[in-house]
Amino acid sequence: MKLITANDHASQNATGAALDLGNTEDPRTAKLDGVTQINLHFPKFTDGRAYSQAFLLRRRLGFKGEIRATGDVLIDQLVQMERSGFDVAVLREDQNLAFAKAQFDRFKGFYQGDAVTVKPAFARGVNA
C-alpha cells in the first residue's frame, strides 16, 4: 500500500479520470467506464462505510484502478484498508509516515481471505 501525506495528496493530480465517491453512495450504481482512480472518504475514523465500498469495488465490480482512502485516516486502520482493497492511503496531518509504514511489518500473514488475497491460508497451502 502506498502512503502519502495530506499535503502531497492536495498537490497531486490524478493520473487519469478520478471519481470522488461519497460514503453514502452505492458503488454498484457508479459509472466506472474510464475511471482510473476512486477516492473514498472517511469523515471520521469510526465510520467504516468506505471499507465496504472498497470491497465491493474490488471483489464484486472487479475495479482494477487505484482506490484511495482520504479523510480521517489513522495508522491503526491501514492494514485493514489494504485487506479491503485500498491501494493508497492519505494520512491525516498528525500521523507519522514512518510509524505508518511500520504497521505493515507487524503482521506476517492472515488466515482469512480478503479483497486482495481471496483464498484463505489453508486453500493456498500455507501453514498459518
Image (cartoon, grey):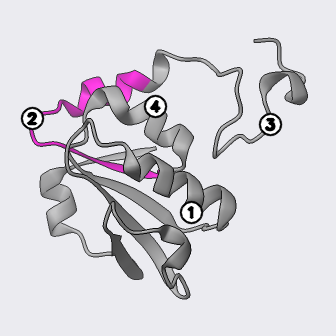
Distance from the alpha carbon under mark 2 to that under mark 4: 18 Å
- Residue topped by disc 1: 57
In the image: residue 98, left or right of residue 26: left
Residue for point 39% across, 50% down: 49
The kind of secondary structure element at disc 4 is: helix
Distance from the alpha carbon under mark 1 to that under mark 3: 18 Å
The kind of secondary structure element at disc 1 is: helix
Residue for point 39% across, 52% down: 50
Q: Residues within 10 Å of mark 1 (few under 14, many from 20)?
A: many
In front here: 22 or 68?
Answer: 22
Question: Which amino acid is tagged 1?
Answer: Leu
Residue for point 23% across, 34% down: 97
Q: What's the mark number on residue 79?
A: 4
Distance from the alpha carbon under mark 2 to that under mark 1: 29 Å
Q: What's drawn in magenta, residue-wise? A: 86-103
Distance from the alpha carbon under mark 3 to that under mark 2: 36 Å
Q: Earlier in the sequence, mark 2 or mark 1?
A: 1
Total labels drawn: 4
Q: What's the mark number on residue 119?
A: 3
Q: Earlier in the sequence, mark 3 or mark 2?
A: 2
